[in-house]
Image (cartoon, helix red, strand yellow):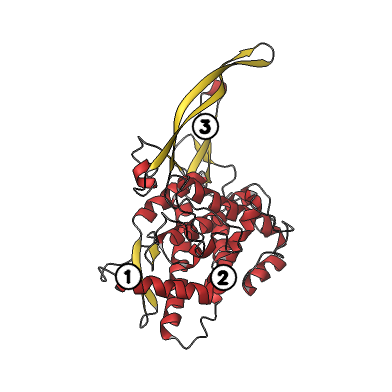
């Protein structure tokens, strides 16, 4: 009964405050994914719902806009990559909220969305700096520590993660830090609003921390005939898929939290005395049912999804199809095979028939 009342309240808040809680800046990445056009890619005009602080960044530093778009695209794409075999597959919609009504539910899926898109901005900005694409930052050449060992030398161009973190904090966090809150006299609604802002800020930080944690040394050998008598090394951000894997592990161990009005911060709902670590994703709402379609929330359901009968992961048919069964269809295809390189310069291939069973959820 308590759970049902909680779900009803969440849906009510969704209807009342949807436009105010939607993370509209993520819409900047949708055009890059080819879902829909968002107008001029070098301006923020046409991007719905940006806060005044975000518009100030756009107007005062317009050369950052392509980087912000790449960061949003990176985050959305990696979200879809990490959840491709799950009931919720991080699908996007044509609405300005990008993910539909689900973005307004403070569940663990929303926690991941905020973290991965925040990380995307850090990653995109850091790489843009090292490539010399931004006037606000440049190739980072300072040594981070003493020479590692003999035969090593710090050099090259470090990825400027510090600037990436600054941009993410300044732009991505802006709506959470500057919202005036709910004007309703409903104390429960105001408390929920504060809880959601605190949740979003924490998860944004977790995303930034993921990139910082995974920064590593990359080295290039120098020497006669590749003897590697000398190495030039520099700091670089990881392949973004590693960031996605890092945050997916945090998603699996996300912690449910509540808002402490007296201390004005979130705390664990259970095990109250345990602190919430800086790299822990947090959520305030239980996840809805992703098995069945819910147009209000933008949930597509799993009907028609391709599943794997023998998989041990989330795409296993009985798991992905929520126990509702699946259809099996024999598929016949012709694919290129036995390809050979013929000098010079042609690749010849044979055509091989391929027959397999495709399973889709009912």
| Mark sitting on residue 3 | 1
Residue depicted at x 49% and y 51%: 79
Along the viewing direction, whichever of 162 and 3 lies nearer the viewer:
3
Q: Determine which residue is flagged by label 3.
A: 230
| Left or right relative to 172: residue 306 | left
Quarter of the picture containing the C terminus is top left
The residue lying toward the viewer, choosing from 184 and 140, is 184
Tell me if residue 315 comes above or below residue 208 in the rendering. Answer: above
Instruction: Report whether 306 appears left or right of 310.
Output: right
Can residue 206 be seen at all in this image of the molecule? no
Quarter of the figure with the N terminus: bottom left
C-alpha separation, residue under disc 1 versus residue under disc 2: 32 Å
Q: Residues within 10 Å of mark 1 (few under 14, many from 20)?
A: few
Helix, strand, or loop for circle 2?
helix
Q: In this rendering, is residue 261 above or below 172? A: below
Residue bearing the label numbered 2: 174
Query: Is 146 drawn above or below residue 202 in the view shown?
Result: above
Q: Residue at x 48, y 52 (%)?
A: 211
Q: Earlier in the sequence, mark 1 or mark 2?
A: 1
Q: Nearer the viewer, mark 3 or mark 1?
A: 1
Q: Position of residue 176 (x, y in %)?
A: 52, 72
């Amino acid at each position: 009964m308590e759970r049902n009342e909680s779900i009803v309240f969440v849906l009510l808040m969704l209807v009342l405050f949807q436009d105010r809680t939607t993370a509209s800046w993520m819409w900047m990445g949708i055009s890059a994914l080819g879902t829909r056009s968002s107008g001029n890619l070098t301006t923020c005009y046409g991007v719905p719902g940006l806060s005044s602080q975000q518009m100030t960044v756009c107007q005062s530093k317009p050369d950052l806009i392509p980087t912000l778009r790449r960061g949003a695209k990176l985050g959305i794409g990696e979200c879809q990559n990490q959840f491709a075999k799950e009931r919720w597959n991080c699908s996007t919609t044509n609405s300005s909220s990008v993910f539909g009504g689900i973005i307004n539910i403070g569940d663990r899926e929303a926690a991941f969305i905020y973290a991965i898109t925040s990380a995307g901005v850090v990653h995109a900005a850091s790489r843009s700096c090292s490539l010399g694409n931004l006037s606000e930052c440049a190739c980072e050449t300072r040594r981070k520590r003493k020479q590692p060992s003999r035969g090593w030398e710090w050099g090259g161009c470090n990825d400027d993660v510090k600037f990436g973190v600054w941009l993410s904090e300044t732009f991505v966090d802006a709506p959470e830090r500057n919202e005036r809150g709910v004007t309703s006299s409903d104390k429960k609604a105001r408390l929920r609003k504060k809880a959601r802002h605190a949740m979003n800020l924490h998860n944004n930080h977790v995303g930034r921390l993921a990139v910082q944690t995974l920064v590593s040394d990359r080295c290039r050998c120098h020497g006669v005939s590749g003897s590697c008598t000398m190495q030039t090394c520099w700091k670089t951000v990881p392949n973004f898929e590693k960031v996605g894997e890092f945050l997916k592990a945090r998603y699996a161990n996300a912690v449910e939290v509540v808002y402490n009005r007296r201390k004005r911060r979130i705390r664990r709902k259970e095990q109250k005395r345990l602190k919430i670590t800086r790299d822990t994703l947090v959520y305030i709402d239980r996840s809805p049912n992703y098995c069945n379609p819910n147009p209000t929330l933008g949930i597509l359901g799993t009907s028609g999804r391709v599943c794997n009968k023998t998989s041990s992961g989330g795409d296993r048919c009985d798991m992905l199809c929520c126990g509702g069964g699946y259809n099996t269809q024999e598929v016949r295809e012709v694919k290129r095979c036995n390809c050979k390189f013929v000098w010079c310069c042609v690749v010849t291939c044979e055509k091989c028939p391929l027959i397999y069973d495709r399973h889709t959820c009912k």
